[in-house]
Amino acid sequence: MKRRVSGLRMVPVTTVTGGLVRSFLFLSLLKIGFQYPDFAGDFYLTGNVAFPPGTVQSEENFLVRSLVPSEEIPCKAGVLQRWPDGSVLSAELTFSANSNQRREYVISYGADVRRRKKLAQLAVLPSIAFSVGGVPKSTENLDVNVGQINVRVDRSPGVRYYWYILPIILILILMVVRSRRTYL
Amino acid sequence: MNRRNITLTRRIVQIISLVLIVYGGYLFKPRPGTYWGRHELTGDQAVQSGKEVSLFPRLKAPQGSMSTTKFSQGSILWPSGKTPVLENFPPGLICRFNPRGGMFKACILHFFNENLSWRTPIKYLLPHIALFMAFCFLLGRMWCGWVCPIGTVGDFLTSLRRRMNIPAKRFSRQVRRSLRSGAYGILTSSLAVSAFIGIPRFTRFQCYWFLPYCQACPARLICPVFGLIKPSWKDFSSGISAGFTILAWLTLGVFVAAFYWGRRVWCHLCPVGLINSWFNRGAGVELRKKAIRCNKCAACADACPMGLTEMYEADKDAIFNQKGCIMCLRCIEVCPQKECLSMSFFGKELIKSEF
């Protein structure tokens, strides 16, 4: 048997606390996961974020915030891919952070969200990749969170019907053995 | 059993089988609803809902299947769309042409055809295949000779021919082989068409080509009469439907004419009988001959409705479960030599010829 699991529009969210990755379910909010570098000073956080279809219409409909203190972080954004309905599928985000000011960052998105602060990427700083959805980005791959996912779990109670193979095989063997005794 | 009662017993069994198969829906309570109209559950969904707990799962058309669009409109196979009492496919059966659904669902060829077209998972087919094989293993092609309603109708036509003093023709081995090849042709072409229209890209053809053999089966025009249903004798709604209707009439003509030409001619051509015959040689029912007691009178060869002569020609003791033999036991009945011919069930002798 196959079972379809579906529900609200839920997105996996990842938070980072001292490098420990945890996953939650959250609505219209994506937490950014990364590891602070060993060096002290400013650096850029850059990564790709994917959104569910129909939620983000343009690159202005999402922004980066720090949780404590709660404020919008200037960021630079560029749309990479779009869903068939024209909404944003994935976008590249870049914003600056400082290893001396450890913060947790989240991405708010939706039709009501307006990004106001934009990053002018003038300085040449080291870049650290961040991830959204619990799987870090590497140089070889790009992890895309596509939002709603339908999972079919096959509990397979019909597997019991496969046991009928045994009598079928038994009958076939008996038929072959017995047919040898038959004339012609 | 007294050998002189064999034909009488066979007639009684045939009539009881005919009544049970065709009118079983009146005798026992069938499941509610009609077969073709019930698409709400496919195989997997039925299991999930907890309604599929029987040993033999119900096999239904997938949701939105084109195979059901035609038959819901009162066309050729619509009478067979009634829910049967048991949705199984034992050997020697016909469709459930009855307003109340009949006893069993259909013949085994119907089973293979429709599930090839529906691409039913193999796990749901295994119970039905196992049951069919078990029945065949027990009785072989005795189902054709003792149960099949088409054979019963054919025997009735044969008795009419006798009364009209029309002699039956005996077929040579070559003719029998040709008829058997024809049965293989019908079987393979039918399965090939069913498999073809099961391919997702070609499922749109199911509304016309679904169950291709059934649309030309003589039972399609004969058995609704027994089931008190007006048969769909003239379905000319489309070119293909008209073709199948004409083909069905031709098949019926061949079926009737064949029984005036010889005895059980259709049984050589029947693809269902062909499938049953694969299990005949190893079946529990055995037909034995003691050659030393045979006086070569050829009574068995004359009496055989299938025109088999191998038993008469044999010069040694043997078991004669030939593929063409329908186990009607006429040979034992007419044999004048005591204990020359006998029928046994897994080695235990039940009936033997008497002087």
Image (cartoon, coloured by chain):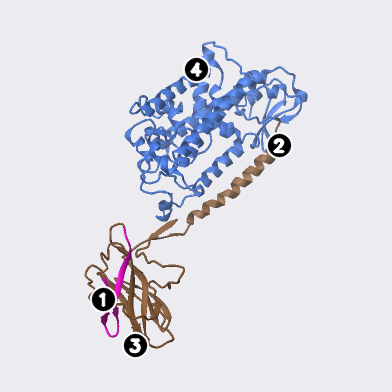
Chain colours: A brown, B blue
Q: How far is mark 2 from mark 4, CA to CA? A: 37 Å
Q: Secondary structure at mark 1?
A: loop
Name the one closer to the observer, B65 or A57.
Answer: A57
Q: How far is mark 1 from mark 2, CA to CA? A: 87 Å
Residue A10 picture location, percent across and down: 33, 68
Q: Which chain's residue wears label 1?
A: A
Quadrant of the image occupied by residue A108? bottom left
- Which of the labelled discs sits on residue A180, or is there none? 2
Residue B79 picture location, percent across and down: 38, 33
Q: Residue at x 40, y 34 (%)?
A: B80
Identify the residue at the far top of this view: B165
Mark 3 or 2 closer to N-term? 3
Q: How far is mark 4 from mark 3, CA to CA? A: 99 Å
The residue mark sitting in front, 1 or 2, is: 1
Residue A141 picture location, percent across and down: 45, 67
Q: How far is mark 3 from mark 2, CA to CA? A: 87 Å
Residue at mark 3 shares a chain with residue at mark 2: yes
Stretch of the chain drawn in magenta? A62-83
Q: How far is mark 3 from mark 1, CA to CA? A: 20 Å
Residue density around tag 1, few if under 14, some if 14–19, many if 20 or more, within 10 Å: some
Q: Residue at x 47, y 31 (%)?
A: B213
With respect to residue B182, does A157 lie above or below? below
The majority secondary structure of the magenta stretch comes to: strand
